[in-house]
Amino acid sequence: MVYSARFSVQTQGNDDMLDITGQVEQALLQSGLLNGIATVFVVGSTAAVTTIEYEPGLQQDMARVMERIAPRDEFYAHEARWKDDNGHSHIRASILGPSLTVPFVNGQLVIGTWQQIVLVDFDTRPRTRTVHVQIIGE
Ligand code: ZN
């Protein structure tokens, strides 16, 4: 069967990283499903979903490395075209990707102890983000 859930989170933008593991586990619990896969998807083209060890050092590292890959002050045709300031946000979000699929077995996500599911908001202002959790299983 397929079970759909969604939740919203408030971010600060500018590489803000939020641990959303608990919300995904809650959706899985509510589904009543025991074995299958859960797809976690953030709506919007300037945020991403991935896994990481959620701790302050890696939060800083992610922001610093992304600044090297897609610098804020680089020229972006997107900004010239739309007169906005978030070309780097779109590129960073596309590189990480908007979704993640996590298997679950016996009602438990098979993530590691030091592996959290995180949402990273690369936009240049605070945003409210909607995350969909689509669960397929039995
Ligand atoms: Zn834009």
Image: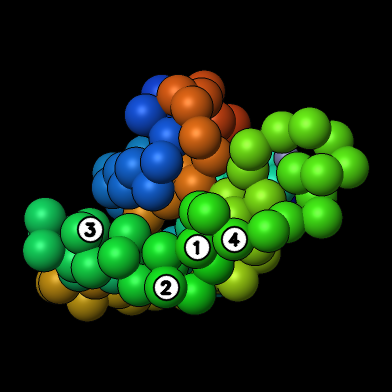
Q: Earlier in the sequence, mark 1 or mark 3?
A: 3
Q: Relative to 106, does residue 19 appear above or below in the rendering?
A: above
Q: Nearer the viewer, residue 115 or 86?
A: 86
Residue 75 vertical position relative to residue 105 in the rendered view, above or below: above
| Measured Cα–Cα span from mark 1 to mark 2 | 6 Å
Tell whether label 1 touches label 4 (CB within 8 Å).
yes
Q: Which residue occupies 68% across, 58% down?
A: 75
Residue at point 30% right, 65% down? Answer: 64
Dividing the picture into quadrants, the one containing residue 3 is top right
Residue 43 visible in rendering: no
Q: Is residue 22 visible?
A: yes
Q: Which residue is mark 2?
A: 68
- The kind of residue tagged 4 is Glu
Residue 118 position within the rendered picture, expressed as x and y whole percent measured from the top left: 36, 54
**Alpha carbon separation for disc pair 2 and 4:** 10 Å
Q: Quadrant of the C terminus?
A: bottom right
Crowd class of label 1 (few under 14; some 14 to 19; many from 20; radius 10 Å): some
Image spot of residue 38 (x, y percent): 55, 61
- Where does the image place residue 68, in percent across and percent down from the top left? 42, 73
> For the residue marked with disc 3, what is the amino acid?
Gln
Kind of residue sitting beneath label 1: Pro
Q: Amino acid at mark 2?
A: Arg
**Of 105 and 125, the residue lying toward us:** 125
Image position of 134 (left or right of 23): right
Establish if 51 lies above or below 23: below
Identify the disc placed on residue 74.
4
Tag of residue 59:
3
Location of mark 1 (residue): 71
